[in-house]
Amino acid sequence: MPGQADSIVYEQRIILYADILGWSNLVRKSEFTPEASQTISQVVDQLKREEYFQNLPGTAFRMAFVSDSIFLSMSPADPAAWTQPLLLLCSRFNRLLDKYFLYVRGAIVMGPVFHEGTTIVGPGVISVVETERQTVFPRIAIHDSALEFLRDAYQEYAETQWLYRGPDGVASLNTIDIGFGSDQAGIVDLAGRTIRWVEERLLADGKDPKLVGKHLWMRAYCQDLFRANAAAFG
């Protein structure tokens, strides 16, 4: 039929979806509080500065932004090409935690998706969003469908440098370690400061069980990172 759109063709891709926790409350405050409005502006600028990614080798990855949500997808044909975009993205997540005390929660899956420009749709999108919602804590959960791909991508690294398993055994990205690369001093510094901030938030948010659960998970994660990396400094 004339004017009829072509059918969407899905392809298997690795998909990362991440969402900033507490964003809705920040947006509500921004209407009346200049400080909240300024924070939103700075955070959006940090997340959407795509020029950081323009000099990466190859063009296999694609990105899309919706408010505070990020989608990053890539063909699984070249696992090693995934490491640099992830380093840049995790470094941004670290900055959100360090400067604005904002948690990020997300997931990584492999699934069928159509991703062109800012348009991303498909069963893989449903899968990654559902996995993010189920993960509860402020982490980037790794679905079983993507785990072997990431093992191939990071085959030259110790598994603990990119993979973290908390007390519940769920596999997630070791975002702080990935974001700092081999900078153990930076890892120890951010982990230590985050532990102190979380202790303050536990006192302030003690009556909210959902927030307390998120804070306790983050404290355990940072304590594990601190112990693993502080030993390098004697």
Image (spheres, rainbow, N blue to C red):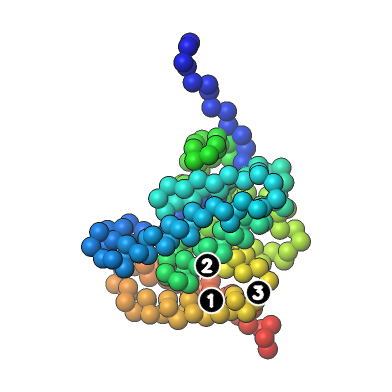
**Residue 93 in the image: above or below residue 196:** above
Q: Is residue 39 visible?
A: yes
Q: Is residue 164 visible?
A: no
For residue 183, which numbered disc appears in the image?
A: 3
Q: Are marks 2 and 1 in contact (CB under 8 Å)?
A: yes
Dot 1 falls on a residue whose secondary structure is helix
Read off the residue under disc 1.
190
* Image position, residue 22 (x, y; %): 36, 61
What residue is at 68 percent from the left and 71 percent from the top? 182
Residue lying farthest to the left in this orientation: 32
What residue is at 32 percent from the left and 73 percent from the top? 205
Q: Earlier in the sequence, mark 2 or mark 1?
A: 2
- Say whether residue 10 is left or right of residue 103: right
Count of numbered circles on the image: 3
Q: Earlier in the sequence, mark 3 or mark 1?
A: 3
For residue 54, which numbered disc appears in the image?
A: none
Read off the residue under disc 2.
94
